[in-house]
Image (cartoon, grey):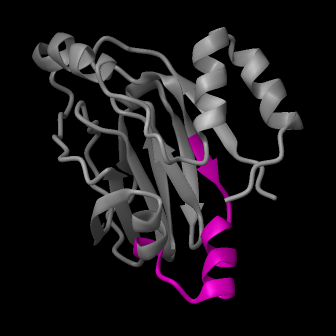
């Protein structure tokens, strides 16, 4: 049973962020790999999160206006700034997964290379990369509004509930009472 951490970030005029939550699952991939011996990439692909990459995370704030993103930490640890200029610091380590909705700014706070992240996109979507470019904000917001919620995603129930209620405190109560398995 996994209880995710849920974070919300508002549009700051440069980074659109999202009405959808950023969701952090702690140690979820450690248990998956110990049980089945499969790779993070295979776990992502089996859930339709493909077009995968393996690397470190960029040290410059950026977001994707064409797709959501999942990142799993294969080895080591890294601290990320999530949500743009006014966001939060989130440290993730081996076995953690973070789901980042389209429009949410993110970057590594360190140039260290002693970790490896595996990323993926729903249905293998092609991604763009927008930095702190105010002139691209309006068009990016419009593209983000048109991105569907991935159908084969374990956090779908949470997202659908949030979209239906529009109430963060209700979503957090549901997460507290809901049992989520990965």
Residue 95 point in image, percent of width and height: 59, 71
Residue shown at the point (46%, 24%) measured from the top left: 86
Q: Nearer the viewer, residue 15 or 24?
A: 24
Q: On screen, 56 above or below 2?
A: below
Indicate whether residue 36 is drawn in magenta. Answer: yes
Q: Nearer the viewer, residue 132 or 161?
A: 161
Residue 118 point in image, percent of width and height: 38, 67
Q: Quadrant of residue 117?
A: bottom left
Residue 15 point in image, percent of width and height: 31, 23
Left or right of 32: which side holds 148? left
In which quadrant of the rendered image does the C terminus lie?
bottom right
Indicate whether residue 31 is drawn in magenta. Answer: yes
Left or right of 158: which side holds 105? left
Q: On screen, 67 above or below 110?
A: above
Left or right of 91: which side holds 58? left
Q: How many marks?
A: 0
Residue 46 point in image, percent of width and height: 45, 66
Outermost residue toward the right in this view: 177
In which quadrant of the rendered image does the N terminus lie?
bottom right
Left or right of 166: which side holds 47? left
Q: On screen, 28 above or below 137?
A: below
Q: State which region is magenta.
A: 23-41
Residue shown at the point (59%, 63%) measured from the top left: 96
Residue shown at the point (24%, 47%) measured from the top left: 125
Outermost residue toward the front in this view: 151
Residue shown at the point (83%, 25%) measured from the top left: 173
Outermost residue toward the bottom in this view: 37
């Amino acid at each position: 049973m996994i209880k995710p951490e849920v974070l919300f970030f508002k549009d700051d005029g440069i980074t659109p962020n999202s009405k959808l939550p950023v969701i952090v699952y702690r140690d979820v991939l450690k248990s998956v790999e110990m049980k089945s011996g499969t790779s993070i990439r295979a776990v992502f692909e089996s859930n339709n999160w493909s077009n995968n990459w393996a690397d470190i995370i960029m040290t410059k704030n950026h977001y994707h206006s064409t797709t959501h993103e999942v990142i799993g930490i294969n080895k080591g640890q890294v601290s990320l700034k999530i949500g743009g200029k006014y966001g939060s610091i989130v440290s993730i380590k081996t076995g953690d997964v973070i789901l980042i909705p389209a429009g949410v700014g993110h970057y590594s706070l360190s140039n260290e290379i002693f970790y490896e992240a595996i990323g993926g996109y729903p249905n293998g979507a092609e991604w763009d990369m927008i930095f702190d470019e105010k002139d691209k904000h309006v068009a990016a917001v419009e593209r983000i509004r048109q991105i569907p919620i991935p159908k084969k995603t374990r956090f779908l129930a949470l997202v659908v509930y949030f979209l239906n209620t529009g109430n963060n405190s209700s979503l957090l109560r549901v997460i507290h009472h809901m049992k989520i398995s990965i």
